[in-house]
Image (cartoon, rainbow, N blue to C red):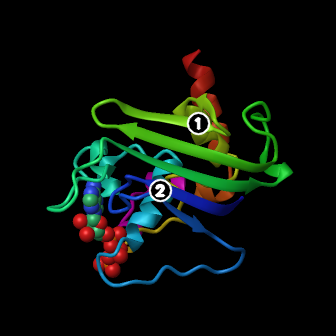
Amino acid sequence: MQIKRLKLSGFKSFVEPAELRIEPGLTGVVGPNGCGKSNVLEAIRWVMGESSPKSMRGAGMDDVIFAGTAQRPARDFAEVSMLVERPTEEVSGDVALAPPGDVEITRRIERGAGSAYRVNGRDVRAKDVALLFADAATGAHSPALVSQGKISAIIAAKPTERRAMLEEAAGISGLHVRRKDAEQK
Ligand code: ATP
Ligand code: MG
């Protein structure tokens, strides 16, 4: 799976709609302290379904919405869209959700009303988005996403947490999501 484009609006410091194109190869995000570099990484994690406000450096999930400054009023929603290219081999049980090729995943949160997800413009469940990324051996909890200061946390992780990381890396997390789903039915 390759990330091709990220669109942000009202997300943290990205109050005005912003579009970031990510070309193949290595991408670096540079800028002075506090300019929003980590916010870009958090936007990627968030649109993939992050459900813990703490890992978004907030107290509640509404904290991802632009909170306002002395000059600008706060926003009442935040939206992040991520365009990815999915190769055929990553599309397993969810062909109905989106065919291989370019897929746009959108998450929107409204103040006090929670999050909603869309895939290629169609309303979907959070679970569908989790599955889509799990099948590509990635997602909000992918060990490939290492936040600032998280390296020491990984070193100190419990064996069960370390196992979850290995399972993500091995690409079998999607199977666990499906098993949990089947057990609930
Ligand atoms: P560093 O180089 O120090 O790691 P950075 O470029 O990673 O900095 P970020 O942590 O991404 O910077 O951005 C922090 C900025 O985002 C702060 O100025 C903070 O006020 C702003 N910010 C975070 N959440 C919100 C929000 N909900 N509304 C408005 N601004 C926000
Ligand atoms: Mg940072």
Going by the image, does 126 lie left or right of 178? left
Q: What residue is rendered at 81% in x and 54% in y? A: 87
Circle nearer the N terminus (1, 2): 2
Q: Looking at the image, which residue sits at the far top?
A: 185
The answer to which image quadrant residue 20 occupies is bottom right
Secondary structure at numbered mark 2: strand
**Residue 97 x %, y %:** 72, 33
Q: Looking at the image, which residue sits at the far right?
A: 88
Q: Quadrant of the N terminus?
A: bottom right
Whole-angstrom CA distance, mark 1 to mark 2, is: 15 Å
Q: Magenta includes 154?
A: yes
Q: What residue is rendered at 59% in x and 53% in y? A: 82
**Residue 64 x %, y %:** 33, 51
Amino acid under disc 1: Arg
- Which residue is the site of mark 2? 8
- Which residue is the site of mark 1? 118
**Residue 12 x %, y %:** 33, 57
Amino acid under disc 2: Leu
Density class for disc 2 (Cα within 10 Å; few <14, some 14-19, many ≥20) is many
Q: What residue is rendered at 54% in x and 81% in y? A: 28
The stretch in magenta equals: 153-165
Q: Quadrant of the C terminus?
A: top right
Q: Looking at the image, which residue sits at the far left?
A: 70
**Residue 78 x %, y %:** 39, 46
